[in-house]
Amino acid sequence: MSNHSHHEHHHHHHGNDLTDKKLLFSVVFNFIITLSEILGGIFSHSLALISDSLHNLNDTMAILLSYVARKISKRPKDEKRTYGYKRVEILAAFTNTLFLFAVAIFLIVESIKKFYKPEIIDGRLMLIISIIGLAGNLITAILLFKESKENLNVKATFVHIASDTLSSVMIIIGAIFIYKYNWYILDPIFTMLISAYILFEGYHILKESTNILIQGTPDSMELNKIKEELEKLNYVEDVHHIHVWTTDGQDKYLECHISLKENENYNLDGYLKEINHILNEKFGIIHKTIQFEKKLCKEGEK
């Protein structure tokens, strides 16, 4: 016996129709809010309101991209896409976050200009429009909250909406002070704060989605612990060439080589059953490819 490979697969549904309907409703709903904010920002001369509308427009595109990505990700695997299309959602999260960064940097530049040349702002119109924006963002955030806990793509979209909700609250506060006291300087200050928040939140999603795209080990996984756990088994000499990755932030895949101790009667099926149980129960890894060997591989080879 030189080696023995085992492949275990487990299929489960990726999202549901309700999430898709929520995303599609959010696209239409947010687009209407975005239009009202763009017009409101132009007529009231408020950069903060325009910044919120650009942020909202980006959110609308983000939700639309999420919706399309979810549809594509549900396609069955084929000979060319043997892992299926799940990673399309991660690509969407990555792309959305890059767009968001671009918007934030643009707004910071514009708000710096406004520090030196503040404009007279219609505080009353700014207040009315920002309240409409807040209501819309809150409804969308409530709709997507549950799904954002389970899906990185929807999480990226939810972060867009949550940051919009926060910026709407800030703009309402700013609008009240501008309306009552003509504190026009608050407009660029709040624009910069909103932009800083966008950059801070976006960084974490960008980091996570990049790690998945380059097939990095998920943060929740420690390869040394997997190695230690499997090497406790009395028939295992050594575990090496361990790779753990994820296609979508949820499903985890593992491949590794396991050198077996000398034995006259190898019970390979029994070994696999026990190893699979350990990987399932202790590490939540469902998809595995395990190669057994005696002396085929030398430790330290890559």
Image (tube, grey):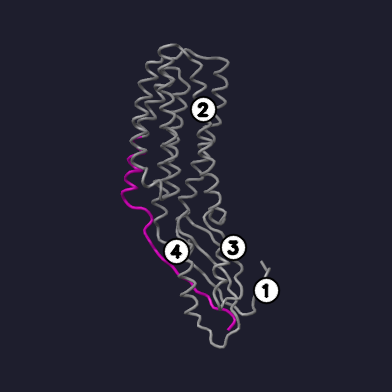
- The residue pinned by badge 2 equals 193
Taking 272 as reference, is 154 above or below it?
Answer: above
Mark 1 and mark 4: Cα distance apart in space? 35 Å
Residue that numbered label 3 is attached to: 224
- Disc 2 residue crowd, few under 14, some 14–19, many 20+, Cα 10 Å: some
Residue for badge 1 = 298
Mark nearest the camera among 3 and 2 is 3
Q: Is 299 situated left or right of 171 in this image?
A: right
Q: Position of residue 95 (x, y in %)?
A: 51, 43
Residue type at the position of mark 4: Asp
Decide which of tag 3 and tag 4 comes sooner along the chain: 4
Residue extending furthest toward the bottom: 264
**First in residue order: circle 1 vs circle 2:** 2
Where does residue 121 sit, x and y in percent of width and height?
A: 45, 14
Q: Name the residue tied to disc 4.
A: 78
Q: Callout 4: few (<14), some (14-19), or many (20+) C-alpha neighbours within 10 Å?
A: few
Q: For marks 1 and 2, give the CA distance.
A: 55 Å
Lower position in the chain sequence, tag 1 or tag 4: 4
Q: Is residue 294 above or below residue 89?
A: below
Residue 161 quadrant: top left
**Spatial CA span between label 3 and label 2:** 42 Å
Q: Name which of mark 2 and mark 4 comes first in the sequence.
A: 4
Q: Is residue 249 above or below residue 206?
A: below
Along the viewing direction, whichever of 221 and 8 lies nearer the viewer: 221
Mark closest to the chain's N terminus, 3 or 1? 3
Q: Is 12 part of what is drawn in magenta?
A: yes
Q: How many marks?
A: 4
Closer to the chain start, of discs 3 and 2, is 2
Which stretch appears magenta?
1-29
